[in-house]
Image (cartoon, helix red, strand yellow):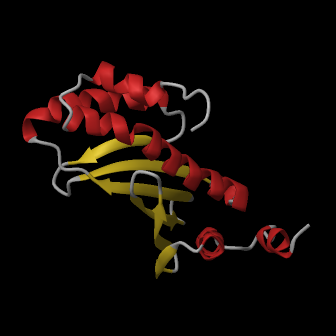
Amino acid sequence: MSLTEQYYETEDLHPIDIVENLAEHHEWDFDRVADDQIAMAVEGQWRTYSITLAWSGYDETLRLICTFEMEPPEHRLPELFEILNIINDRCWAGAFTYWHDQRLMVYRYGLVLSGGQSAGHEQITNMINSAVSSAERFYPAFQLVGWGDRTPAEAMQVAIAEAYGRA
């Protein structure tokens, strides 16, 4: 067992401390906004994603918000909302929403840790990986609907298509 794994196994560790340690390990840019909140930038294939994790002791939930800028033309918003519904039906953990005023696509997830449970590094790593992989997977579909004049059904074929072979 590595020293890092032993460090993660202590139950009295605050979940944001675990996130900070993960960010340092992966060399992600981050800012410890408060004792219970951290913001970081995670590089993906399509773009850099802004990820914020915050702990709410009141409802015992670790909340993750992953955002990226998206400014589709106003006339394409109905199609964007339609593809959001289709995509959210395929997301088992977390969901996308579009914050129109901020011009942000948002992936949100909350890990409920009621009854004094604690989050482990694997759970938090999975949260972050799930957010980034979902954003990466569906980013092309959002782009095709917003700017490519594709229907949501056509755009989803890109997001769900399996890649075969090697480049």
- Which x, y percent locates residue 94? 48, 42
Which quarter of the rendering shows the C terminus? Answer: top right
- Which x, y percent locates residue 46? 40, 51
Q: Is residue 157 above or below residue 120?
A: above
- Which x, y percent locates residue 82? 26, 26
Task: Say whether residue 3 is left or right of residue 86.
Answer: right
Between 159 and 114, the one nearer to me in the picture: 159
Residue at figure coordinates x 51%, y 63% from the top left? 58
Residue at figure coordinates x 52%, y 45% from the top left? 133
Q: Is residue 131 above or below residue 4?
A: above
Between 1 and 111, the one nearer to me in the picture: 1
The answer to whether residue 120 is seen in the rendering is no
- Which x, y percent locates residue 101? 16, 54
Task: Say whether residue 156 is left or right of residue 92.
Answer: left
What is the quadrant of residue 150 in the picture? top left
What is the quadrant of residue 7 in the picture? bottom right
